[in-house]
Amino acid sequence: FVTSNESFLMKYRNFNTNPTGENTTSCVNATMIEMNETSDYVLHHVTYLNTTSGETKAFNKSYYVISSECYTTRNVLYGTVAGFNTSELYPFAFADSNCAVIRKDSWSNETFKACELWVFESALEEELSCCHFVFDLLCTRGYKQKTYDPKLCKPKDIEVNVGATESTTITNSNTR
């Protein structure tokens, strides 16, 4: 799933990173920018919209795809954000050709398993019944934070400034 050249988006998760409980994160998108199949390494460029400030934030996150204890299948992402000395484990609960349910160990504890549902951009309008079912079965605790809103996260209109000589100017004309 994570080695695809196609971008994928977080559709929802069962936890909130904002201490006030507000949903301030939307349009989370990950795009692979580098892969090394020999070392099972991938690098993603991740962007998200901070709905409070209206700013799109970005960072690079690297992953090694590893196996869980007692497994031979590589079913866990070992992720690190560039410039930080912290790492996280993301075990896959389920993945198919359109979507994946990924656990986030850093937000989990004995009684709660934090999860995210990720979807390939091309599958946003597809029936994702297996992913929804697995998420609801393994992750739901009565709370789903929607992180993808088609109106807010629609593809940006791109204008090219034809008067630019050295470089092309691209502006975001997405209005809120």
Image (tube, helix red, strand yellow):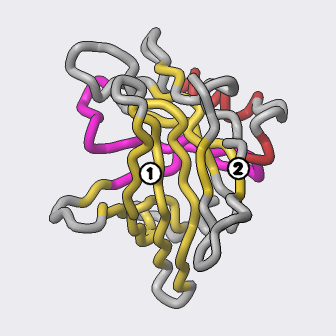
In the displayed structure, would residue 170 be above or below residue 43?
Answer: above
For residue 53, which quarter of the picture?
top left
Residue 60, given in percent of the width and then of the height, sits at 39, 63
- Horizontal arrangement in the rendering, residue 14 relative to residue 22 (left or right): right
Q: Residue at x 51, y 50 (%)?
A: 92
Residue sticking out furthest to the front: 163
Question: In terms of depth relative to the viewer, which is nearer, 136 or 11?
Answer: 11
Q: Say which mark, if any, is on residue 91.
A: 1
- Asked if the residues shown at circle 2 and circle 1 are in contact, with their CB atoms under 8 angstroms apart, the answer is no
| Residue 7 showing in the rendered view | yes
Residue sticking out furthest to the left: 85
Q: Residue at x 46, y 54 (%)?
A: 46
Mark toward the start of the polypeptide (2 vs 1): 1
The total of numbered circles placed on residues is: 2
- Horizontal arrangement in the rendering, residue 45 relative to residue 106 (left or right): right
Q: Amino acid at mark 1?
A: Pro
Residue 36, given in percent of the width and then of the height, sits at 52, 85
Q: Residue at x 45, y 13 (%)?
A: 143
Q: Distance between the Cα atoms at labels 2 and 1?
A: 36 Å
Q: Say which mark, if any, is on residue 158.
A: 2
Q: Say which mark, if any, is on residue 118.
A: none
Residue range (magenta): 89-112
- Horizontal arrangement in the rendering, residue 22 relative to residue 28 (left or right): left
